[in-house]
Amino acid sequence: MLVTTRESGRWVIPKGWPQKRRSPAATAAREALEEAGVVGTVSKAAIGSFSYKKRLKSGTVVCEVRVFPLRVKRQQKRWPERGERDVQWFSRAKAAKAVRDRALAEIIRSLPKGK
């Protein structure tokens, strides 16, 4: 499952800034809920990382993203960013082709087949 960015409409995975008193895995699960409405079980271990340049009002900053897989149990009918992003389910191969970042594409290709 991929979501679009709000500004450019590129396909990406849900991601966000670290949050106090919340583990990186729990933060990833929270971002998936906010950006795509998905609820499930998140892995405590990251399966990879990649970096990208994020444009802010104050300039550009390089962000390092750790990727935590989430086994989706359900998608809610409503979620905080529903009207701000597109959400689409892809096969691993199509998701890897849809994202622009090569390191993220490799992480997606390495995902185990779902059950």
Image: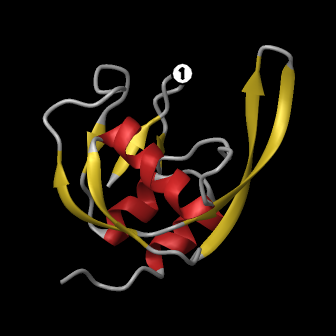
**Could you say whether the residue bearing mark 1 is in a helix, strand or loop?**
loop
Q: Is residue 87 above or below residue 51?
A: above
Q: Nearer the viewer, residue 9 or 58?
A: 58
Q: Which residue is mark 1?
A: 7
Q: Nearer the viewer, residue 87 or 10?
A: 87
Give the total number of marks visible in the rendering: 1
Residue count near mark 1 (Cα–Cα under 10 Å), binned few <14, some 14–19, many ≥20: few
Q: Residue at x 35, y 70 (%)?
A: 93
Question: At which x and y percent is residue 3?
Answer: 39, 42
Question: At which x and y percent is residue 42?
Answer: 41, 68
Q: Nearer the viewer, residue 105 or 46?
A: 46
Q: Amino acid at mark 1?
A: Glu
Q: Residue at x 32, y 55 (%)?
A: 1
Question: At which x and y percent is residue 81?
Answer: 36, 26
Q: Residue at x 57, y 78 (%)?
A: 45
Apparent side of residue 61 relative to residue 91 in the rendered image (left or right): right
Q: How is the rendered protein coloured?
A: secondary structure
Q: Is residue 22 above or below residue 67?
A: above
Residue 82 in which image quadrant: top left
Apparent side of residue 108 relative to residue 73 in the rendered image (left or right): right
Q: Is residue 4 above or below residue 19?
A: above
Question: At which x and y percent is residue 48?
Answer: 63, 74
Q: Residue at x 52, y 75 (%)?
A: 44
Residue farthest to the front, as pictured: 21
Of the 4 image quadrants, the one containing the C terminus is bottom left
Residue 23 in which image quadrant: bottom right
Q: Is residue 34 above or below residue 107?
A: above
Residue farthest to the top, as pictured: 57
